[in-house]
Image (cartoon, grey):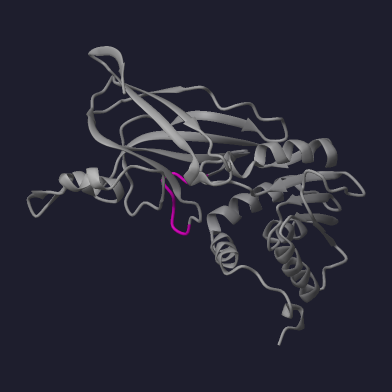
Amino acid sequence: MNTHAQSIYLDPRLGQMHQVMLGDRTRLEAYDKALARDVRPGDVVVDVGAGCLALTLLALRHGAGHVYAIEGDPATARIAGAILADNGIADRVTIVEGDARTVSLPRRADVLVSEMLGNIGPEEEMGEILAICAERHLKAGGAIIPQRLTTVINAIRFDGESWGVWSDDLAGYSLAAARPFLGSSAQLHFFARPPELLSETTALAAIDLGQPPGALPEHRDIDIIRPGRLDALALAFEADFGDGIRLSNFPGYPGCNWAVFIWPLASSQVAAGDVLRVSIRPGAWVRDALSWQIDCGIRRSTQRDLQP
């Protein structure tokens, strides 16, 4: 029996979340490429929101001299300590338990790395936290991984799944009568099939990580570029690591651990030239993506008034 595991308990839901994240090879490959580029032998690295140390271990593989792994959850921090001891690398990594915005470190880092990407992008407060960490802990000219985080939005038609099934025929019959009974609220969705895009991917907000983030825009106009049945708005993130290294959860990929935020609409028919005016409001608890709200109106190409 592994004695390090004694008296260490992790909420099963958190354990499952870590399993899914560690199994997301596309996620790990993007970070691995960026760390291979930015970490030099002997560098000091700070891993913000270190979890079970995936990024810390990648940084060590690429030559980091020491990693400060900041983790706010006590149970996860203890498990991280057990992983270090089990691998005999506790001398190369310091677990720093606490809020990344307030902890103190003995020296500044050459590289700051973090994976606090939410389904929408900013709801884990990655922008705010990394801005503070960069000011407090990163050397001048140090690298931040990733470099930029963008929240994107698409107008979509589902391919016979999720909200879209209530507008499709089944054996020649319509299911649309069920839709009014179902309500319309935010969903987190993994696509079984790629949706039909009725708009270009539109940037809703972008954050240069390491800099204080701005406020969400009051509204954003989305141009409809092809006709079809509008089932929903899909919000997702794009993380830019530089040098063509990019990570996004829309529409997803095999093993992706992030769902896409879906805001169902009334399955209206739209035409090329129509414009959606969209505004997004974070929930009372910003980290709960399902509490975020969207207002959407359609400005028809043949009727310029905004329709609710």
Q: Which residues, given as a range, are shown in magenta?
A: 248-255
Q: Residue furthest bottom?
A: 1
Residue at position x 77%, y 59% from top? 60
Query: Could you say where residue 223 lies in the image, as x and y percent from the top left?
Result: 36, 23
Q: Is residue 164 left or right of residue 18?
A: left
Q: Is 215 rendered above or below residue 191?
A: above
Q: Which is nearer the eye, 41 or 86?
A: 86
Residue at position x 58%, y 41% from top? 286
Residue 110 seen by the camera? yes
Task: Using the rendered view, name the quadrant where residue 58 is placed.
Answer: bottom right
Q: Look at the image and say whether residue 59 sits in the magenta stretch.
A: no
Residue at position x 37%, y 28% from top? 296
Residue 138 seen by the camera? no
Q: Is residue 173 left or right of residue 161?
A: left
Indicate the quadrant containing the N terminus: top left, top right, bottom left or bottom right: bottom right
Residue at position x 72%, y 74% from top? 8
Q: Main secondary structure of the magenta part?
A: loop
